[in-house]
Amino acid sequence: MARTGSCLCGAVRYSVTADVSHTGACHCGMCRKWSGGVYLGIEVAAQDFDLQGQDNLTVYTSSPWAERAFCSSCGSSIYYRVTAQGPHHGTYHVGMGTLDNVANITLDGEIFIDLKPDGYAFAGETQKMTEAEVMAMFAPG
């Protein structure tokens, strides 16, 4: 099922043509600061992501291997994109909170689990990765 989404003010809109049925949670310090809490993202290949209103985005290079984009008008966190060469290059992690319809999306993974604040926990079983495991997967070199 294709999905659509937008920032809070509507200046940035997008559509995802691939089926979206899973989300993952990131507990790293950058995602918590960027999103104001745990970041829930849906993974989208570049060819399945159609973005409108790009001139309303501010893109921030947050690490040597990724960038984050947010609406310049309302501040909504739109995506995290892997820029490093490798199997994940160009992959978008679109903020689940920006989707127009979140029905039938299951939380199936959590990354930076060792950095998760003690104040919350998700119900159910998820695949979990530590900071070291994530760094080995995404960080170049």
Image (tube, rainbow, N blue to C red):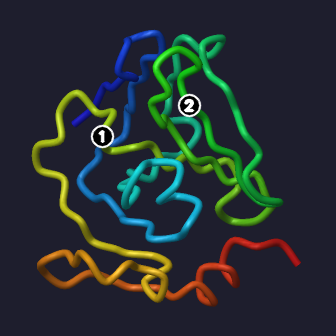
- Residue 60 in the figure: left or right of residue 102: right
Seen at 71% across and 55% down, the residue is 89
Residue 12 placement (x, y as % from top left): 48, 16
Seen at 41% across and 50% down, the residue is 36
Residue 8 shows which numbered tag? none
- Residue 21 in the figure: left or right of residue 128: left
- Residue 141 in the figure: left or right of residue 75: right
Is 136 situated above or below 43?
below
**Mark positioned earlier in the residue sequence (2 or 1):** 2
Pointer 2: what residue? 70
Is 105 situated above or below 102?
below
Element under label 1? helix
Quarter in which the C terminus is drawn? bottom right
Residue 41 placement (x, y as % from top left): 40, 53
Seen at 26% across and 81% down, the residue is 126
> Callout 2: few (<14), some (14-19), or many (20+) C-alpha neighbours within 10 Å?
many
Q: Amino acid at mark 2?
A: Phe
Seen at 17% across and 33% down, the residue is 101
> Callout 1: few (<14), some (14-19), or many (20+) C-alpha neighbours within 10 Å?
many
Residue 97 shows which numbered tag? 1
